[in-house]
């Protein structure tokens, strides 16, 4: 009896997950269809994102053209950091944009309608704004990442490839978690706090350079509070066969991307706490 009940509960959870995934894909399809109504505008937005990120990387190239190395790191090595974090952020920004604009829903009272639907509030908010135009940053980040892969004189073993993909996945989870935290604050502040963007968008700028160039308190913040180092800098050290991070053995870098997923789970628990304490604006 106990085994049958356990199997039934497992199947129910799987069905719930699949149902949620189907719902999210339906939300995404509707959102993308709406964006493609104005294809000229879509193309220009994509090109705008590509141009902005290309100019950003050209600034990094100019830095290395002048100084050759940065604390022992070459341009190709930094390009690996850059590519991983920008691909991860582009994916997170595309699928988690709903949390980034969530404050407007609270202010307008639109979140009340979300609460009436028998589905996860986080799932509904995530699916409400799926931004396809973020593909511009994604393509540029992928281009830099692929250039770094071919420019670096290292053997790309299955372990290194898996670690690179895990770093991208962990980074995506971390940035979505930051978007979730920013949205949760809106339950109490109503307006979105721009200071959170210093961690989200500022975190992208931070993670595209080796963490060793920053001060100790700064390194600790982006390791133990917001684990950006764990999903980018630490894995890159192992990929480049450098010494383990902060005195830890090198194998720690292979586990560190999982902290991105753990960070997202914690942020979702904070979100649930915010939902329980939500008070409608009465708009």
Image (spheres, grey):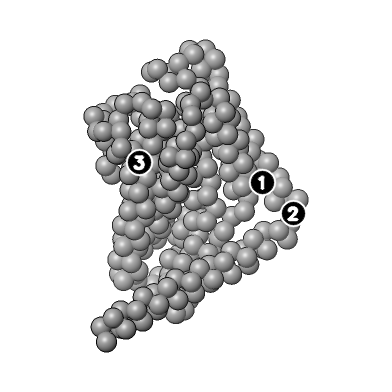
Residue 270 showing in the rendered view: yes
Identify the residue at horizontal 63%, vertical 67% (top origin).
30
Residue under circle 3?
A: 254
> Looking at the rendering, which quadrant does residue 185 occupy?
bottom left
For the N terminus, the quadrant is bottom left
Measured in 3D between alpha carbons, the distance from the residue under mark 3 to the one under mark 1, in whole angstroms, is 36 Å
- In screen coordinates, is 175 left or right of 259? right
Q: Which of these two is toward me, 107 or 114? A: 114
Circles 3 and 1 in contact, beta carbons < 8 Å: no
Q: Which of these two is toward me, 273 or 234? A: 234
Q: Nearer the viewer, mark 3 or mark 1?
A: 3
Identify the residue at horizontal 51%, vertical 25% (top origin).
152
Residue 274 showing in the rendered view: no
- In screen coordinates, is 34 left or right of 182? right
Helix, strand or loop at label 2? It is helix
Identify the residue at horizontal 47%, vertical 40% (top origin).
158
Circles 1 and 2 in contact, beta carbons < 8 Å: no
Q: Nearer the viewer, mark 2 or mark 3?
A: 3
Residue under circle 2?
A: 39
Image location (x, y in percent) of residue 113: 48, 76
Residue under circle 1?
A: 45
Measured in 3D between alpha carbons, the distance from the residue under mark 2 to the one under mark 3, in whole angstroms, is 42 Å
Question: Residue 78 got which mark?
Answer: none
Picture layout, residue 183 above or below residue 23: above
Q: Tell me which label, 3 or 1, sits earlier in the chain.
A: 1
Measured in 3D between alpha carbons, the distance from the residue under mark 1 to the one under mark 2, in whole angstroms, is 10 Å
Helix, strand or loop at label 3? It is helix
Crowd tier of the residue under label 1, counting other residues whose Cα lies within 10 Å: few below 14, some 14–19, many 20 or above: some
Identify the residue at horizontal 33%, vertical 48% (top origin).
259
Q: Tell me which label, 2 or 3, sits earlier in the chain.
A: 2
């Amino acid at each position: 009896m106990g085994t049958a009940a356990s199997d039934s509960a497992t199947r129910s959870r799987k069905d719930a997950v699949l149902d949620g995934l189907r719902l999210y894909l339906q939300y995404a399809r509707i959102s993308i269809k709406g964006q493609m109504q104005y294809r000229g505008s879509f193309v220009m937005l994509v090109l705008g994102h590509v141009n902005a990120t290309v100019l950003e990387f050209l600034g990094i190239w100019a830095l290395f053209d002048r100084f050759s190395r940065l604390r022992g790191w070459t341009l190709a090595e930094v390009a690996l950091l850059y590519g991983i974090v920008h691909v991860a952020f582009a994916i997170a920004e595309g699928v988690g944009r709903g949390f980034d604009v969530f404050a407007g829903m609270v202010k307008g009272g639109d979140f009340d309608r979300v609460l009436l639907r028998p589905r996860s509030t986080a799932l509904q908010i995530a699916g409400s704004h799926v931004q396809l135009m973020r593909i511009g940053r994604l393509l540029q980040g992928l281009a830099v990442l692929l250039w770094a892969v071919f420019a670096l004189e290292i053997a790309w073993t299955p372990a290194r490839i898996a670690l690179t993909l895990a770093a991208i996945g962990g980074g995506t989870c971390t940035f979505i978690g930051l978007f979730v935290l920013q949205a949760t604050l809106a339950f109490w502040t109503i307006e979105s706090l721009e200071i959170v963007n210093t961690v989200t968008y500022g975190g992208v700028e931070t993670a595209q350079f080796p963490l060793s160039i920053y001060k100790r308190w700064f390194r600790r913040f982006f390791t133990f509070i917001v684990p950006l180092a764990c999903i980018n800098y630490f894995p890159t050290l192992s990929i480049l066969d450098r010494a383990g991070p902060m005195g830890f053995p090198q194998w720690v870098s292979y586990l560190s991307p999982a902290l991105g997923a753990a960070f997202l789970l914690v942020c979702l628990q904070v979100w649930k706490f915010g939902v329980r304490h939500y008070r409608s604006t009465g708009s």
